[in-house]
Image (cartoon, coloured by chain):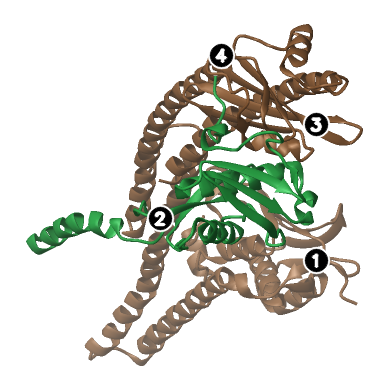
Chain colours: A green, B brown
Amino acid sequence: MKKLFAFALALLCILPLLASCGGSEQNVRGSNKIYYIKEDKHGRRSLAFEYSDEINGATPEARVGQIISAIKQPRTAKALPALPQVIEVKDLKIRGSTLEIDYGATYGFLGKAEQVLAAAAVALSVIDDGDIEYVVIKSGGEAQPPVYDGYLFNEKFVLDELMY
Amino acid sequence: MVFAAILLTVLLVINIYPQQAVKRQMTETARKDMIKDAATLASALSNIPELNGSNIGSAVSVLNILSENRRVLVVSDGAVVLFDSVRSQSLLGNVVLYSEILGALSGNDCFYSRFEGGAINKWAAVPVTRGGITLGAVYIYENDEAGASLLADLSSNIRIVSAIVAVAAMIAVLLFTHDMGKRLSKLLTGVKEAGAGNFKYRIDMPGDDELKMIAEEFNSLSGQIQSNEKARQQFISDSSHELKTPLAAIKLLSDSIVNNDNISREEIKEFLGDISGEIVRLTRISESLISINQALASDDVALYPCDLSETARKVKELLKVTAQAAEVTVNVDADGAFFVSGTSDGFYHIIFNLTENAIKYNKKGGTVDLSLSRGGGKVTMRVSDTGIGIPEHEQEHVFERFFRVDKMRSRATGGTGLGLSIVKEWVDRFGGDISMKSVYGKGTVFTVVFPESEDPK
C-alpha cells in the first residue's frame, strides 16, 4: 500500500513535466501560428491556428512562401486548409512592413466566404511571423475581399463570437 | 434493484425529455423569428443602390427590428462591418469572421443558439443579394435571459416533482416488498410443514389477492391429503382387523385339534370344515382388497366401450346356482346393447356385487330385477330386490369399507363388507354415479348412471 501511494505521488509530480513535452501544439518560442479552418458538428466554420516550427526561411519572402505552403497543408487531420492547393501565388512583394500577394486567376473562383477566410488566414499567419504588419490581397492585379481599398492588419479581424 | 433501475430510467426520461422538447420548440420559434427579421432587412437592403452606414441605419429604424437585447450587424461581401447597432465598442470597419456570416456569404440562411450562463444566446445571418450576387449579409445576435429563466424554472420544477415521486415510490415499494416478503414466508412455511408430513398445518393468509387464493388452495389440498391419509390408515387398520379375525379362528380351531388327544374323527372333520370356511373367507377378503386396489390403480388404464347388457346376462348365469340355493329369481331386462366407457372387469365387479348382494339379502321366493335403459346421453342401470332392506340410520354408511348392516347374516353368507365399496370405486372410476333407496323390511333399489358411449362397431 505504501509503495502504491509513493508511486502515485511520483506520477503526480512527473505528469506536469510530461504534459509540457509535445509537438507543435505547445506555445514553443519561435514557433509560427498557422491558421486553418475548423468545422464543428453543426457545420459552423471558423478560423483556428496550430503552431509550426518549420518556418525557417532566411528572408521574409522565403518565410512568407513557407507560411503559405503550411496554410495549404495544415498538420492535424481535423484542420481544413484555408487556402486550396490549386491557388498559386503569381507575385509576392514585401515593401517595408507591407506584404502584397497577387494570386493567379483561380483565386477568383473561390466563393466570397472562402476568399474572406483565405485572406484572413494568410494575413493573420504572416503578421504573426513578426516582420509584416499589413497585407494586401490581389488577384490578377485587382484588390480582393475582404478589403478592396485598404490593408489587412491584425486588429482588423474579429474571431471571437459576437456578444451583447 | 430492478425496480430502482426502472424508476431511475423513468425519472431520467421525465427530467430530460420535456426540457429537451421545450428547448427545441423555443429554438425553432427563435430561429423563425430571427431569420424572418434578418430576411426582412436583407430584402430592404437589396433595393438600396449603395450599402453604407447611413442607408442601412435608415432601413433598420424604419423596419423597427431592434430591441433591448438584440444587436444587428450588416457586413459587406468581404465580411467588413458596414453597420453596427451598438455604438460603444462598435465593430464598424472590422472583418468579422463569424460562422453564421461566413455561412450567409456562401448564400445560406444560418442560425445557431446555445444555452449558457443563465441565458439563451442566438445568432442568425441572412445574405443580402441582388440579381444573384451576394452583396453582404445581415447578422443578428440576441441574448434571451427570460427564456432561459423559464426553462430553468421548468427544469427545477420537474426535478422537485421527480424527487418527490422517487421518494414516494421507494417508500411504497419498500412497504410492498416487506409485506409481500412476510406473506411469501408464510407460504414457504406451509410448504415446508407439508413436506415434513405435517398435513394439519394451515396457512393463515390475510388479504384478498392471488396469494390468498394460493394459501386457500394449499389448505384445501392439505385437508384432502390429511383425509386421504386418515382413510388410508383406517383402511389398513380395518383390513388388518378383518384379516386377523379369520386367522384367529383358524388358529383356535387348529390348536383345538392339535392340543386335544381325545378328539374324535367327526370333530376333526367339523373343525377342518370350519377352518376351510375361514380360509374361503380370507380368500374372499383378499380378492376384494385386490379388486379395490385395481379400481384405485386404474387411472392409467385405457377405457373402452363395454356392453353392459352382455355383462348383465353373464352375471345372471354365474349366479344361477347361488340364486337357486337362496330360492330367489333373477330377471334381466336389457333389450339391445348399452355401451359405456370403462373396462370389462370393472363392470363385472359392479354388476356381480350388486346382484349378489340383492340375492344374499333377499327373502325366500323373492326377486332381483336388473334393468338397463338409456336417455339424455346416459345409460341407467337399476338393481332392485325384495329383500330385507337397510335401516334408514345406516343407509349413509353402506358404501364404506367393511361396513355391514347385519353382521351375523353377512358372516353366514361369506360377506366381507367390501362389496359396495368396490362397486362405488368402479362407478367413480368410470365417471358414473350410484344412488340407493331402501325401505327396511321391503327391499332396496340401487341406481347407477353412466355417460353413454358410442357403439365401437
Which badge, 4 or 1, comes first in the chain's sequence?
4
The subunit carrying tag 3 is B
Q: Are marks 2 and 3 in contact (CB under 8 Å)?
A: no
Residue that mark 3 sits on:
B135
Label 2 marks a residue whose chain is A
Instruction: Kindly indicate whether the residue at mark 4 contacts the one at mark 3 (C-beta within 8 angstroms).
Output: no
Residue that lies at the very extreme toward the front in this rendered image: A95
Q: Quadrant for residue B374, please give it.
A: bottom right
Q: Which residue in the protein does label 1 denote?
A: B331
Q: Which of the labelled discs sits on residue B146, or is there none? A: 4
Q: Residue at x 29, y 87 (%)?
A: B257
Q: Secondary structure at mark 4?
A: helix
Location of residue B163 (image quadrant): top left
Task: Give the residue type that dot 4 points to.
Answer: Ala
Q: Is residue A90 above or below residue B60?
A: below
Residue type at mark 2: give it.
Answer: Ser
CA separation in Å, label 2 and label 3 = 38 Å
Residue at the image position 78 percent from the left and 59 percent from the top: B451
Q: Residue at x 67, y 55 (%)?
A: B434
Q: Marks 3 and 4: which is nearer the front?
A: 3
Q: Residue furthest left?
A: A2
Q: Residues within 10 Å of mark 1 (few under 14, many from 20)?
A: some
Question: Does label 1 or label 3 sit earlier along the sequence?
Answer: 3
Is residue B279 at least partly visible in the picture?
Answer: yes
Label 3, secondary structure: give it.
strand
